[in-house]
Amino acid sequence: MRVSFPGIAGMIQHIRNGRLRALAVTSVKRSPQMRDVPSIAEAGVKGYEASLWLGILAPAALPKDINVRLNAEVGKILKQPELQASFRTIGTEIVYRGPEDFGKFVKSELGKWARVVKETGMRAN
């Protein structure tokens, strides 16, 4: 038996056609694309959460007017129903966060994973 933690997008077709069996999703709540698969907390692993996330970053010195416009345009694109539906079909949910909220999220993720690295003694190889 093999166990893996791949992202839903790359595995959803294999799960749907029965080649793989999903035991749980690692997010806080169930995936809308796999409602019958429990979250990892529901499966008995309390306090664990790991989600794949992507973001658009820019240099800290980016002029404020460009940052505001870039954020507005990206926000419009990500909120398009057709784009959201397209991503949903491959098991991915788009969660739009403004710059401040995304910055806080990134800082919390960095803290969480830095703690995991320190407590486990992980090393890059």
Image (cartoon, grey):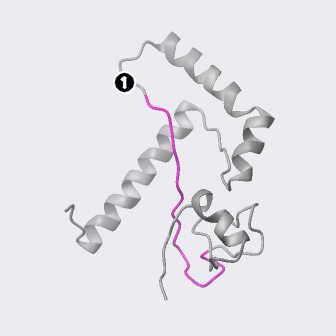
Q: Residue at x 61, y 38 (%)?
A: 97
Look at label 1 and name its amino acid.
Answer: Pro
Residue that sits furthest to the bottom in the current view = 1
| Residue 63 or residue 1, whichever sits in front | 1
State the count of labels: 1
Residue underneath mark 1: 59
- x, y (%) of residue 23? 62, 80
Q: Residue at x 56, y 39 (%)?
A: 101
- Queried whether the magenta region covers residue 50, the answer comes back as yes
Which segment did they paint magenta?
A: 40-57
In the displayed structure, would residue 80 be above or below residue 44?
above
- x, y (%) of residue 65? 52, 10
- State which quadrant residue 63 falls in: top left
- x, y (%) of residue 59? 37, 24
| Residue 122 or residue 80, whichever sits in front | 80
Q: Residue at x 51, y 72 (%)?
A: 48
